[in-house]
Each structure stands twice: as C-alpha cells, then as structure tokens.
Image (tube, rainbow, N blue to C red):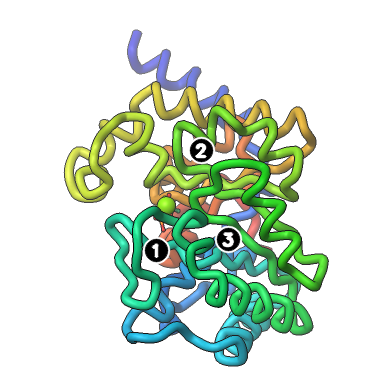
Amino acid sequence: DAWLAQKRRDEELARAIRSDTAVRANVGSLDERIPPSADGIGLVRTELLFSGRLSPPGEMEQASVYAALAKGVAGNPCIVRLFDAGGDKPIPWLPGEGRGMDLLLAHPHVFEAQLRAIDRAREHGDVQVLVPMARSAEDIERVRAGLASDAPVGALIETREAADAIEAIARVSDFISVGTNDLASSVLGVDRAVLRWEGTEAFLRDERLLVVVRTIVERAHATGRKVTVCGELAGHPEMARELVALGVDALSVACERIASVKVALGARNR
Ligand code: PEP
Ligand code: MG
C-alpha cells in the first residue's frame, strides 16, 4: 500500500544519499549570518552586494569584500558569481539588454575589474568563479582568459539551452552549478516570480525539471565534473534528499536552511 511504498522509497533514498555531501551558503548581503556548519559559500550574488548604488564598485573594494567572505569560511571554497544583472534583476550600473554573462560582456570595464578583484582575493582564500547564465564553452573560456590567477571557473546552468549544451560547457569548466530558480522557469515556461511565491512545490516537483537536472548530472559526471545545485529548490529538505539521490555532489542554500538540509541528509557537522 501507499505507506509501504513510501517506506521503501525512503529506504532507497537513504541508501543513495551520501552523508558527506557539502552544504554551502548562498550569500546576497554582507549582513548574512553564515552558520559555522556551512561547508563554505556556494554562491555569492555579487550584484546584490553592490546593488544600492549608481556606479559600479571598484576593484579594490570588491577585492576586500570577496577576501573577507573567503576568510570567513577559511578551509572551504567561496564561490563568487560574476555580476548577474538584467531581466528581473535590474542594476543601475549594468544597464542594457540581456542577462548574466551576455549583459556583463557589454560592460568590459566592469567585467575586467571584477576578475582582477577575484585574482586579488585569491591571496586570502579558496575563491572560485561562477559564470551566470552561461551559454557556451566560449563564455567560460572568456572568463578564464581574463583571470591572471588559476581560479577554478564553474558554469551556472540556468536555461534549457545551456542544459542542452552541457557537454561542451562542462569540458572547459572546472565544475558545474545548476541554478534551478531560472532553470525551472526556462524548462517549465513559467515566470520566476510565480515559482518563488505560489505553488512552488508543485512546480519544483515537476518531473520535467528533475529530468533536466538528472541529465545535467549524468553528462557533467561523464566529463569528470562535479555538480552543485544552488537554486532555492535545494533548500527544501525533501528535495535536497532527492537531488543528492540523483547524484548531485553539493548543495548551496539560504543560510537559514543549512541546518535543516544537513539534518535531512544525515550529514555530519564538520
Ligand atoms: C538560480 O537561478 O537558481 C540562481 C541560483 O540564481 P538567482 O536566483 O540569483 O538568479
Ligand atoms: Mg539565476
């Protein structure tokens, strides 16, 4: 009956879940309280850190902010996402069409200053780079070419098109992260705002989304790359279990969700 089926499914999940899955923090403000149990920072939404101003932050200011975040999670990675403006995230100092990498490349001075800031911050911790709205292998290569350091570069996969191009993208990336907030809206054809505020669970459980995540994981693993999920989806304890059972290697969730996700995964607090 239903109860037995559920029990069997739970046991299956428990077997598939490894307790050493890293659970990292999503950071969008400097006042965020990152719990000590966090296994590093899996996503810094850098556009939000500097959103309340009219001109872009300079290289030195950014470097000190990224260095401080990295020092706060010393011994663990601090994954800094390049400015992701556009669409529903307008930033006054990154005007124009497009979103993520597309829009950033239209502002080469801002792009280059951010990469230099990351190079500087790497002297203080394990700072890594995440490319928002990655579209192609070329996007990743442009970021790598702009860095003076050997910072690991990851691709944030958050559109259907990027998911379709995952093999080529993974081959030139150090790691893959899946942004399920935007990916869900791309795959399911619904507005992100709807996903956030109404019927979230039903949409997120939609098989079409999980099939795409599974395919990303399989193809990225085939090229030897690890996969993180950093959308809000990963912060639901039950979904976190399912994602890990699908083969996802690490999760990055809102700070206040870390404890319950760790409990759900049976993770040791390191
Ligand atoms: C996402 O789209 O899932 C994501 C992590 O990025 P953001 O929510 O900042 O767009
Ligand atoms: Mg996104």
The answer to whether marks 1 and 2 mark residues whose Cβ atoms lie closer than 8 Å is no
Mark-to-mark CA distance, 1 and 2? 31 Å
**Residue 257 location, x and y as percent?**
42, 59
- Viewer-nearest of labels 3 and 2? 3
Report whether residue 19 is seen. Answer: no
Mark-to-mark CA distance, 3 and 2? 18 Å
Front residue (pair 34, 109) = 109
| Disc 3: residue Cβ within 8 A of ligand 1's nearest atom | no
Q: Earlier in the sequence, mark 3 or mark 1?
A: 3
Give the residue at mark 1.
85
**Residue 99 location, x and y as percent?**
41, 55
**SS class of the residue under badge 3?**
strand
Mark-to-mark CA distance, 3 and 1? 19 Å
Residue found 58% across the figure and 47% down from its top: 177
User: What amino acid is found at the position of numbered circle 1 in the picture?
Assistant: Ala
**Residue 204 location, x and y as percent?**
34, 35
Residue found 44% across the figure and 49% down from its top: 231
**Residue 192 horizontal side relative to residue 231, left or right:** left
User: What amino acid is found at the position of numbered circle 2 in the picture?
Assistant: Arg
Residue at the extreme right of the image, as rendered? 150
User: What amino acid is found at the position of numbered circle 3 in the picture?
Assistant: Gly
**Residue 170 horizontal side relative to residue 248, left or right:** right
Q: Earlier in the sequence, mark 3 or mark 2?
A: 3
Q: Is residue 132 above or below residue 72?
A: above
Q: Disc number at residue 42?
A: 3
Q: Is residue 254 above or below residue 247?
A: below
Give the residue at mark 2.
241
